[in-house]
Amino acid sequence: MQAIVARKLRRSFGDREVLRGIDLDVDYGVIATLLGPNGAGKTTLIRILTTELMPHGGEAYVAGYDVVKQAGEVRRRIAVIPQDARPISYMTPYEFVYSYLLLRGLSRGDARKAARESLEELGLWELRGVPIYQLSGGMVRRTLVAAVLASNAEIVFLDEPTVGLDAVSRRVVWNSLRRYSSGGATIFLTTHYIDEAEQISDVVFLIDNGSIVSRGRPRDLVNSLPGKYVVEYPASVNNNSCIRVGTSCLSFVDSLNEVGKDALRVSPKSLEHYVLVTIKSWGEGNEEG
Amino acid sequence: MYWLPLSRGVRVMRRVRGGLRHQLRAVLVLAWLNGLLPIFRSPLWTISTLAMPVSLLILLTILYKGMGLMMGIVGGLVWTMLSSGTALIGDAAYYRLELKFQQMIVATPTNPLAYAVGLALSEVVFTLPGIVLFSVLLVIKSAISAEGALEIALSLVLLWYAVSSVAFYSSTLFTYIRYTWAVVSLMTLVLGILPPVYYPATYLGSMWWVAYLVPTSSSAMVLQGILGIAHYSSFQLALAYVSEIVWCVIGTVLT
């Protein structure tokens, strides 16, 4: 059985079709990342998979249960951090995590134990009694992550979980996510940090304009690009082998000797370059996505 | 079900509580985190909710002595219940729009009804100091029978249910948190000041039917009738109960 399955999933807001037939398969025990520009449909897809929003067509299964017809069963097995979520600020990290676990149905003993383990793992145990409004933005975000990872849900959905985190805090979260998924659970996350997706993902899905346009392991996707290096030129440069992305033009070369005099920058090819050349609708997104 | 870690990297599945017992516990957890905890964190929040009804109580007592005091007590009890409902609008909208806490709870075994009841109960817990204050004043200043006390309690519970259920529904209509502030102020005016909450419904004269349009004045009529500070016929009191029940039904259907 797969953790997440979506078939021809559709959803509109008014006249605007945000999801245009999403097909998706995610196994257990992996970190799957959904990448795409603003308004591509990432958040809408997560809201449907977490039973918050009804699809207008197609079907989706989470943990083997239909997200529409068996929403209750799905909810028992998932945990979610929505986009821009924040914990209740007058609570302490311990109170927030503990009460969230009680609302998830854990016994008080299990909740106490899991809350402590999770707060320790995310480096918040020493701050467990400090009101959240006194914590830094990174610690506030880590409190949310601590809550959902303490839940021991089968499938965890994280909508941009590391927004606003510094480099160290991001790595703390990455390590926790990796540890969590290694236990057999699935983590499905969205992010705008492509380096993050490259670092922690087992599988990446690219969503553009409401459709999945590419999927695969980060390394495989990068290897599918030609050459070894990516040379970035101004878009005005007339070069037939150059792929225009916004105000730049990307050219893939095997040797640094091939770099032209107008080059803005040169770097080894990466997932970011794959995303840049695969996504077609950069800058077209709007709020609801 | 959830994954229980035996050791790092090895998990087994255990059944989570999702039945009635869990829902009841979820209600209490929500009442604790949104009702009791804020009182302990900052008692000033609770005291501030008492500012208006206590001010009106003092004003009416100065102006009308004993009768004013009783009107102020009745109004204070009704106002406190009303404020628990209006606070629910703000809190439910805040949790949904700003914190996304509601979305986090959607993805748990806690069902929407338990979430709504938990938040509604938390508002009552938060206004408990006010309820205690006006109840103590009521006991001290009136010779109320046990039967009368029960009837007052029933009327206030109906009011709480009606106001809370409508308030929870109303909170779902907002797409921007600041809009709730204006609506809460208007609701306080329309439900707490304009209708006969702090004055007898008999003052309305030919407009008597206005008293039955909102649950606050219906509840106030019941309380005023029991305490003998206004005289209503049995039919009028029965109609007040019907109004409260109808609002409870409307709130249930909407929510």
Image (cartoon, coloured by chain):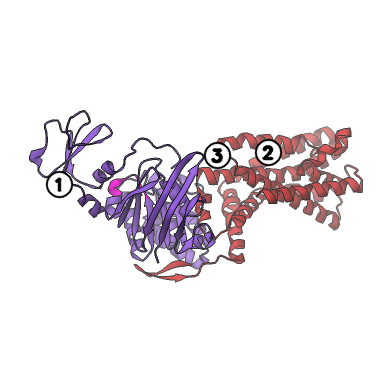
Chain in purple colour? A
Judge if badges 2 and 1 mark residues of a common chain: no
SS class, disc 1: loop
Mark earlier in primary sequence (3, 2): 2
Residue B212 % position (x, y):
81, 42
In magenta stretch: residue A192 = yes
Question: Where does label 2 land, which residue?
Answer: B51
- Please tell me which residue lies in front, B234 or A166: B234
Amino acid type at mark 3? Thr
Q: Is disc 3 placed on a helix, strand or loop?
A: loop
- At label 3, counting other C-alpha atoms closer than 10 Å, the crowd grade (few under 14, some 14-19, many 20 or more) is few
Q: Residue under mark 1: which chain is it in?
A: A
The residue beneath circle 1 is A228
Residue behind mark 3: B175
| Residues in magenta, as a range | A190-196
Q: Quadrant of residue B62?
A: top right
Q: Tell me how far mark 2 sits from mark 1, CA to CA.
A: 71 Å
Does the stretch in magenta take in A260? no
Tell me which amino acid carries mark 1. Lys
